[in-house]
Image (cartoon, rainbow, N blue to C red):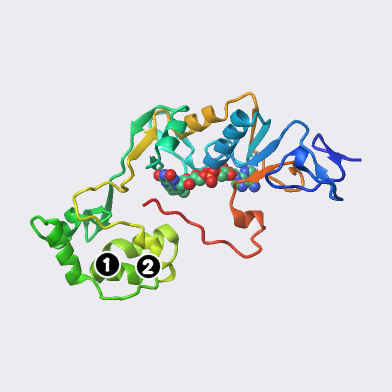
């Protein structure tokens, strides 16, 4: 029987996605067993690195972690420019959570720097704090200063009375009115989601808070941090373990990487060869 890329072909196995060799049942499918690995993880982003670390340290599994990019950390990848400036190659990232247990887990691999985001929205030739808070409202409506009650009364005046919003546009109109919808949400949503707010569910823009205080932070999470030496350093430490082999610059190919356990962390539409088209996947950080 052929050998493929050094992995012997063996008969009589089917593949349970999260099983192990000892769980494999007899069958008639040919599977390429990974010689020395309990698990192959496709994608060395945050999810892949975390699964690798857990399998290696908690289950004592032999782990093969692959990524088609030449680095770990996935979209969180960062590196130092020769000037000493940290660059987040795929867009700026910081870490936020309300989960103390998660923070404690990650603290094994990094020290932290405070990492709040303060986002300004450029509209009408001015910068406004965003998400909308009392300072935004005062600046936008040219008021001296607003109390929480005055802020709420102002929004009650300008908002459109839409009983049951069916999409994000209606939701925002019913919350802050058309003027602020056009100033702050329309362009932002088109850029962020590449979709019109009319075509997004109310919950998408609904996740962006309107605050009746002067908190200008982007999100409210209890912990807002950035790894002291960067995300790449943190994830590199996470997967530096004798049980983990990392192979970078290698594309996953289903036929070549079947194993007792394969975890794929790449885009799901790509995995299924875009059989149902490209999924409108996106994220929102608020
Ligand atoms: C611009 C931007 C800003 C963001 N800001 C934040 C933020 O501030 N805070 C935050 O918490 N989140 C942020 N996110 C979201 C964050 O990046 C993701 O939640 C996180 O990266 C998801 O991790 P992941 O491991 O699932 O996927 P990814 O990071 O995408 O990693 C998946 C990896 O799988 C690899 N892969 C895919 N297909 C294959 C294949 N066929 N063969 C081999 N390898 C493959 C890819 O190369 C990639 O490295 C941001 C995202 C973007 C794009």
Quarter of the rendering containing residue 52: top right
Residue drawn at point x = 19 percent, y = 52 percent: 213
> As rendered, which of 173 and 119 lies closer to the eye?
173
Tell me the quarter of the image containing the N terminus. top right
Label 1: few (<14), some (14–19) or many (≥20) C-alpha neighbours in 10 Å: many
The vertical placement of 51 against 220, above or below, is above
* Spot occupied by residue 128 in the image (x, y as percentages of width and height): 22, 54
For label 2, the crowd category at 10 Å Cα-Cα, with few meaning under 14, some 14 to 19 and many 20 or more, is many
Percent of width and height locating residue 165: 35, 73
Q: Which residue is label 2 attached to? A: 168
Q: Is residue 3 left or right of residue 48?
A: right
Q: Position of residue 167 (x, y in %)?
A: 39, 70
In the picture, measured across the screen, residue 72 lies left or right of residue 34, that is left
**Residue 43 sits above or below residue 161 on the image:** above
Q: Which is nearer the eye, 11 or 127?
A: 11
Q: Which residue is mark 1?
A: 175
Q: Is residue 150 visible?
A: yes
Residue at figure coordinates x 67%, y 31% from the top left: 61
């Amino acid at each position: 029987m052929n050998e493929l890329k050094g992995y012997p072909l063996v008969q009589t196995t089917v593949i349970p996605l999260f099983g192990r060799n000892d769980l494999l049942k007899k069958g008639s499918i040919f599977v390429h067993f990974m010689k020395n690995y309990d698990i192959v993880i496709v994608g060395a982003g945050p999810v892949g690195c975390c699964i690798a670390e857990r399998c290696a340290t908690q289950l004592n599994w032999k782990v093969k972690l692959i990524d088609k990019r030449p680095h770990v950390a996935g979209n969180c990848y960062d590196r130092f420019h020769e000037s000493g400036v940290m660059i987040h190659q795929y867009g700026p990232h910081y870490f936020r959570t309300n989960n103390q247990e998660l923070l404690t887990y990650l603290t094994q691999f990094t020290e932290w720097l405070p990492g709040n985001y303060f986002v300004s929205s450029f509209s009408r030739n001015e910068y406004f704090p965003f998400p909308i808070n009392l300072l935004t409202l005062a600046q936008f409506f040219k008021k001296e200063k607003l109390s929480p009650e005055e802020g709420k009364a102002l929004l009650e005046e300008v908002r459109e009375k839409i009983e049951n919003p069916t999409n994000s546009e209606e939701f925002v109109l019913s919350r802050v009115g058309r003027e602020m919808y056009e100033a702050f949400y329309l362009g932002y949503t088109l850029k962020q989601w590449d979709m019109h707010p009319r075509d997004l569910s109310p919950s998408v823009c609904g996740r962006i808070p309107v605050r009746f205080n002067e908190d200008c932070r982007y999100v409210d999470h209890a912990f807002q941090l950035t790894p002291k030496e960067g995300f790449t350093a943190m994830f590199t430490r996470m997967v530096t373990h004798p049980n983990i082999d990392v192979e970078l610059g290698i594309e996953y190919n289903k036929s070549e990487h079947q194993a007792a356990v394969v975890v794929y962390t790449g885009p799901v539409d790509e995995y299924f060869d875009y059989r149902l088209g490209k999924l409108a996947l996106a994220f929102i950080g608020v």
